[in-house]
Image (cartoon, grey):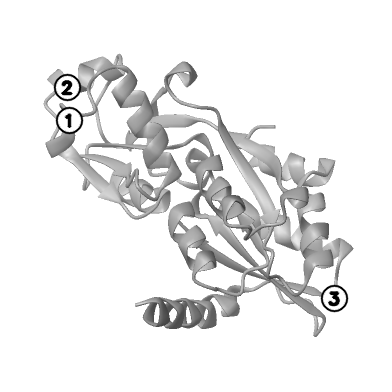
């Protein structure tokens, strides 16, 4: 099974390499990043290449849990950007990251959304249990940080178990956004930054931040990386004023 999963990873990388930010024949860095970063990271990569023109960054997106599993199974990743601490902690416990390079570089917030043409209104999360809703899109809490935060919030107000039959578990937050955009689900829980990359959805409400743990994105260099210096340079860049300005533009917070 491990061999098959690594073959699948290799196949994915062949596909995404066509979307790499190519900048010559210099050093190549593979960045595995949470799906919620798929928009902003492309611009961050271009800005990074202005400072490091001989470095090529290949971007691999997915649910943080799935990406961590790929790294555990030997995927040749240089930098991991997670949407929560859990999966970075898991890798650190297994000595699979360099803890000295680990840093929280941005934050996010949880929001409830619906399709633009929907007339659904929600006054509070508690009311979801009594509303006439068919389906609610959430990230799979076992592997998707956005789903984990959603579960925390809905559990805090006592409706997670009540809503169980209406929940559609998505493979990552991008899929949640797609479900809400298309109207395949009535509503969905995504990040505030996701609102910046879709004109087909609208925010119903910002979820009370006291109902879930603070959404912090950690970055770290993978212990097995053969390009540690450039990988460290990329993480340092993420902390720069230039990178933070780009992150803010895409709905992330410092």
Q: Which mark is residue 216?
A: none
Side (left or right) of 101 relative to 219: right
Identity of the residue drawn at 17% across and 30% down: 163
Is disc 1 in contact with disc 2, using a CB cutoff of under 8 Å?
yes
Side (left or right) of 123 relative to 207: left
Image quarter where the N terminus lies is: bottom left
Q: Earlier in the sequence, mark 3 or mark 2?
A: 3
Q: Is residue 103 above or below residue 46?
A: above
| Whole-number angstrom distance, CA of label 1 to CA of label 2 | 6 Å
Q: Is residue 49 above or below residue 189?
A: below
Give the image location of residue 26, x and y in percent.
Answer: 82, 81
Tell me the residue that label 3 is attached to: 54
Side (left or right) of 196 relative to 55: left
Give the image location of residue 173, x and y in percent.
Answer: 41, 48
Q: Earlier in the sequence, mark 3 or mark 1?
A: 3
Is disc 3 in contact with disc 1, using a CB cutoff of under 8 Å?
no
Residue 140: tell me if it is visible: yes
Q: Which mark is residue 129?
A: 2
Q: Which mark is residue 163?
A: 1
Identity of the residue drawn at 29% across and 19% down: 125
Return the residue nearer the eye: 232 or 176: 232
Image quarter where the C terminus lies is: top right
Mark 3 secondary-structure assignment = loop
Give the image location of residue 45, x and y in percent.
Answer: 72, 61
| Whole-number angstrom distance, CA of label 3 to CA of label 2 | 54 Å
| Whole-number angstrom distance, CA of label 3 to CA of label 1 | 51 Å
Mark 3 or 1, closer to the camera: 1
- Crowding around mark 3 (Cα neighbors within 10 Å: few <14, some 14 to 19, many 20+) is some
- Crowding around mark 1 (Cα neighbors within 10 Å: few <14, some 14 to 19, many 20+) is some
Is disc 3 in contact with disc 2, using a CB cutoff of under 8 Å?
no
Mark 2 secondary-structure assignment = helix
């Amino acid at each position: 099974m491990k061999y098959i999963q690594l073959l699948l990873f290799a196949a994915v990388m062949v596909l995404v390499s066509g979307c790499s930010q190519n900048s010559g024949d210099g050093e190549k860095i593979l960045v595995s990043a949470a799906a919620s970063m798929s928009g902003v990271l492309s611009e961050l990569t271009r800005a990074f290449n202005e400072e490091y023109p001989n470095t090529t960054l290949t971007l691999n997106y997915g649910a943080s849990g799935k990406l961590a599993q790929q790294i555990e199974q030997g995927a040749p990743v240089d930098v991991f950007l997670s949407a929560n601490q859990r999966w970075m902690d898991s890798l650190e416990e297994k000595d699979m990251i360099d803890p000295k390079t680990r840093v929280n570089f941005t934050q996010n917030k949880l929001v409830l959304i619906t399709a633009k043409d929907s007339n659904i209104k929600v006054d509070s999360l508690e009311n979801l249990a009594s509303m006439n809703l068919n389906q609610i899109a959430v990230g799979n809490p076992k592997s998707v940080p956005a789903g984990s935060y959603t579960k925390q919030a809905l559990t805090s107000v006592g409706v997670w178990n009540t809503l169980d039959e209406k929940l559609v578990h998505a493979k990552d937050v991008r899929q949640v956004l797609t479900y809400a955009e298309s109207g395949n689900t009535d509503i969905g829980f995504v990040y505030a930054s996701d609102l910046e990359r879709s004109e087909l959805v609208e925010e119903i409400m910002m979820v009370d931040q006291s109902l879930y743990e603070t959404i912090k994105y950690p970055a770290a260099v993978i212990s097995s990386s053969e390009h540690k210096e450039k990988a460290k340079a990329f993480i340092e860049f993420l902390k720069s004023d230039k990178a933070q300005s780009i992150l803010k533009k895409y709905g992330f917070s410092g």
